[in-house]
Amino acid sequence: MRAFGIHLKIERDSLKERKRASGQTLVEVAIMLPILVSLVMGALDLGRIFYWGIVMKNAAREGVYYLSSNISDCKATPALVQTRQRVKDEANKNGLALIDGEITMVQGTCPASGEPVTIRVQHTGTLTIFAIFYPSIANLYQTATMAVQ
């Protein structure tokens, strides 16, 4: 019987240890979970910044391509209406909403045939994870240049 009593004591002790280990695991998860969530959200924000950059570059290319072929849009009143619309359409197709003020022609005057024309697209976006700590805004811009035909 004595051996049986020792056996029961060993089982009780191992049960206490398991409960203690389970509580320790819960504390470790509670400490690590916010860190892991922050890392994942930061990676998502970084991915969004790169995605916005690609979309903006493609939109700037679309705008400069249109403007280099249709320089009369530069001379129209108001100027660059069709070019801005092309840029906004390209960005909207990829989920980025731009406004007219974010699309500009770098040159002050309309370039002549053979001269370069540059379109600049800029966008201000809010980042998710960094907004927890301080208001975080990503100011991004992309340019594209092409010779007027």
Image: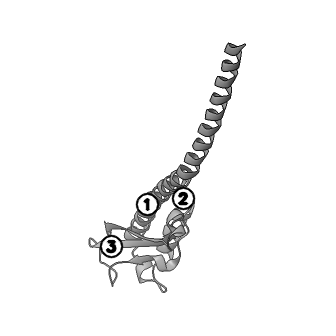
Q: Is residue 10 visible?
A: yes
- Tag 2: residue type? Asn
Q: Which residue is mark 1?
A: 58
Q: Which residue is mark 2?
A: 94
- Report how far apart the C-alphas of labels 2 and 3 lie in the structure: 24 Å
Looking at the image, which residue is at 41% across and 71% down? Answer: 67
Numbered tag placed on residue 117 in the rendering: 3
Classify residue 89 as left or right of residue 109: right
Q: Residues within 10 Å of mark 2 (few under 14, many from 20)?
A: some
- Tag 3: residue type? Val
Q: Is residue 72 visible?
A: no
Classify residue 96 as left or right of residue 18: left
SS class, disc 3? strand
Q: Residues within 10 Å of mark 1 (few under 14, many from 20)?
A: many
SS class, disc 2? loop
- Among the 4 quarters of the image, the one containing residue 17: top right
